[in-house]
């Protein structure tokens, strides 16, 4: 992290707007550092609480890794949970894969010891569950992973269990997303400010924005802001100076941001 | 707030949101006016589904699973290539077990009906909503009379696509039986559209006990808690969720369709509603 700060310090574009952006970037970097620790703590508390609440043998969180199209188990709790950490499974298969690809929770149990039932789940963990609840981790309109609960001690998982676990899973998803957002915002601002992206390569910059925008589809205002910054960076120096001056005036005299109205029920 | 006596939700069975109206304590409120109840005709319950075809739009169906009874007559899957999609023949396999579970429930209730698997899950994570839409489109084009959709899309971008598809299905006389999302309050297409038959779970362990809920979007309740179902690899498991309630209603719709082949979707829905279990039951002796 310090090297990023140094790079920010090496290039110091002039103007109040750019200075403002620098402070935003530095703040985002600090936030990101705090977030990653908070995120781990939060995820751990979620799986711990899940085990305690359901009186389950284990709970774990698997995150989707787009590069490999796999679900990777990153954290687990419970006496039989630890063996799963580090394992990765195909994102479209099995119980966790079902919850991930459909966005629907699923609760199943084995009626009696049946070796065919277990082969999907026990591979590599050394632990063979009798019942499984898998719920998608959803934040805004994205599914980022799956929360799994294994072997509730007092019988099979109920519809109410599904609902409660879904709340926990969504908490976990929000924690993940906050971390990702801080990281992406920080990274993007760093590149914009330090010239990490060639200003004359418009296509590359647009690609970067569109990739980042896809992963942050829920927060339009942030990306409108980023878009404006990009345009600003690509503009002629005199236009930039004018824009920064306008921003400065607007920043000092604009009324407090008003809340947007509730979004329409359906976007078409 | 006239039904104060129904208030103690804490003592409720383990049923959330969409299933709430099917709890024994509040079920009496589902009761319909007498003229409507008098339409009840359950003679179609005697059908075995002979001559009918049911599509299972899901993760595939394991064709040689004993619980399918050799009734899987065709398996296809959606292959996406950019904007284009193709329906190709598929092996009779199930990459999860979920589709086999749905098919097994249906086969147990309509053993003479033929089953077609339309696999839209298990590959290509990035465009699953589109795969689902293309699979559904194929079912409608093929004029398959009943489709079990124990899945839904959350993509608001596909709202118009699914809306158009359910209209096409309605006019083509293809009945879409859809699981309500297990997350009430979120987009869930096409299960939230009015022309489909949307289903949530109740916990009465009887495959032929179903309820009608006059307060949409979820109109029907069927058994979906601790349901024994076939699963991948020739196994059997216990499943819980709206996914497992939906095939019960799909099977009932198949019985109606087999008995009254020319019945339109709204006529089928009306028969299903009129023939639903008496919600008054013994839980509320004050009800008529």
Image (cartoon, rainbow, N blue to C red):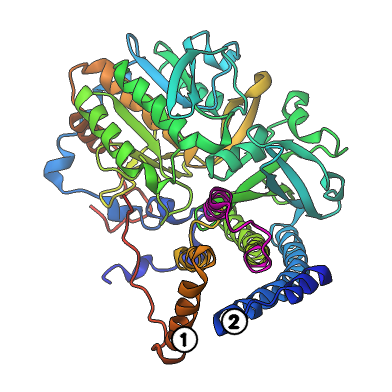
> Would you say residue A113 is visible in this rendering?
no
Q: Residue at x 69, y 57 (%)?
A: A54
Label 2 and label 1: CA atoms lie apart by 10 Å
Q: A185 or A228: nearer the eye?
A: A228
Q: Is residue A209 magenta?
A: yes
Where is residue B101? Give x, y as percent.
55, 27
* In the depicted structure, whether residue B66 falls above or below residue B127: above
Q: Is residue A211 above or below residue A68?
A: below
Assign a secondary structure to mark 1. Answer: helix
Question: Which residue does the image show at 37% across and 32% down from the upper left?
Answer: B249
Measured as percent of width and height from the top left, residue A192 is found at 62, 65
Horizontal arrangement in the rendering, residue A192 relative to residue B217 (left or right): right
The residue pinned by badge 2 equals A20
Which range of residues does the magenta coloring cover?
A189-214
Q: Nearer the viewer, residue B180 or B134?
A: B134
Q: To which chain does the residue with label 2 belong?
A: A
What mark, if any, has residue A251 been given in the picture? 1
Q: Horizontal placement of A258 versus B262: left or right?
A: right
**Nearer to us in this view, B14 or B167:** B167
Circle 1 chain: A
């Amino acid at each position: 992290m310090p090297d990023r700060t140094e790079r920010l310090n090496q290039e110091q574009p002039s103007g109040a707007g750019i200075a403002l952006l620098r402070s935003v970037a530095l703040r985002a970097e600090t936030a990101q550092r705090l977030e990653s620790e908070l995120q781990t703590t939060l995820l751990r508390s979620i799986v711990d609480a899940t085990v305690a609440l359901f009186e389950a043998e284990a709970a774990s969180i698997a995150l989707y890794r787009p590069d490999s199209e796999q679900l990777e188990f990153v954290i687990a709790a419970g006496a039989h949970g630890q063996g799963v950490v580090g394992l990765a499974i195909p994102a479209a298969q099995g119980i966790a894969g079902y919850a991930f690809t459909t966005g629907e929770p699923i609760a199943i149990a084995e009626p009696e010891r049946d070796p065919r039932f277990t082969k999907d789940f026990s591979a590599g963990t050394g632990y063979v569950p009798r019942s499984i609840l898998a719920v998608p981790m959803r934040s805004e309109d994205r599914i980022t992973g799956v929360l799994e609960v294994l072997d509730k001690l007092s019988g099979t998982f109920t519809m109410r269990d599904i609902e409660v676990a879904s709340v926990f899973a969504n908490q976990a998803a929000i924690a993940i997303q906050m971390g990702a957002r801080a990281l992406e915002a920080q990274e993007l601002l760093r590149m914009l400010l330090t010239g990490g992206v060639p200003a004359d390569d418009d296509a590359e910059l647009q690609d970067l924005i569109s990739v980042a925008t896809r992963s942050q589809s829920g927060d339009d205002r942030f990306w409108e802001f980023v878009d404006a910054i990009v345009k600003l960076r690509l503009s002629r120096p005199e236009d930039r100076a004018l824009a920064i001056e306008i921003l400065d005036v607007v920043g000092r005299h604009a009324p407090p941001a008003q809340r947007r109205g509730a979004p329409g029920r359906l976007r078409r | 707030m006239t039904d104060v006596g129904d208030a103690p939700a804490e003592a409720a069975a383990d049923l959330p949101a969409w299933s709430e109206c099917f709890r024994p304590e509040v079920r009496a409120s589902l009761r319909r006016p007498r003229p409507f109840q008098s339409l009840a005709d359950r003679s179609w319950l005697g059908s075995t589904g002979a001559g009918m075809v049911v599509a299972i739009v899901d993760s595939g169906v394991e064709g040689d699973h004993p619980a399918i009874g050799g009734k899987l007559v065709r398996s296809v899957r959606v292959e996406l290539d950019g904007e284009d999609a193709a329906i190709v023949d598929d092996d009779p396999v199930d990459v999860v077990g979920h589709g086999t579970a749905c098919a097994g429930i249906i086969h147990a209730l309509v053993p003479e009906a033929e089953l077609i698997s339309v696999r839209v899950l298990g590959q290509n994570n990035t465009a699953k909503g589109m795969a689902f839409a293309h699979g559904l489109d194929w079912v409608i084009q093929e004029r398959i009379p009943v489709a079990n959709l124990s899945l839904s899309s959350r993509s608001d971008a596909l709202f118009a696509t699914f809306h158009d598809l359910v209209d096409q299905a309605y006019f083509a006389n293809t009945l879409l039986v859809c699981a309500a999302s297990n997350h009430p309050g979120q987009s869930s297409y096409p299960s939230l559209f009015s022309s489909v038959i949307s289903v949530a779970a109740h916990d009465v362990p009887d495959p032929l006990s179903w309820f009608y809920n006059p307060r949409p979007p979820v109109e029907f309740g069927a058994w979906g808690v601790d349901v024994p179902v076939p699963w991948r690899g020739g196994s059997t498991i216990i499943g819980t969720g709206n996914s497992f309630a939906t095939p019960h209603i799909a099977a009932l719709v198949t019985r109606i369709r087999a008995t009254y082949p020319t019945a339109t979707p709204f006529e089928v829905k009306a028969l299903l509603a009129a023939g639903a279990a008496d919600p008054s039951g013994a839980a509320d002796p004050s009800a008529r």
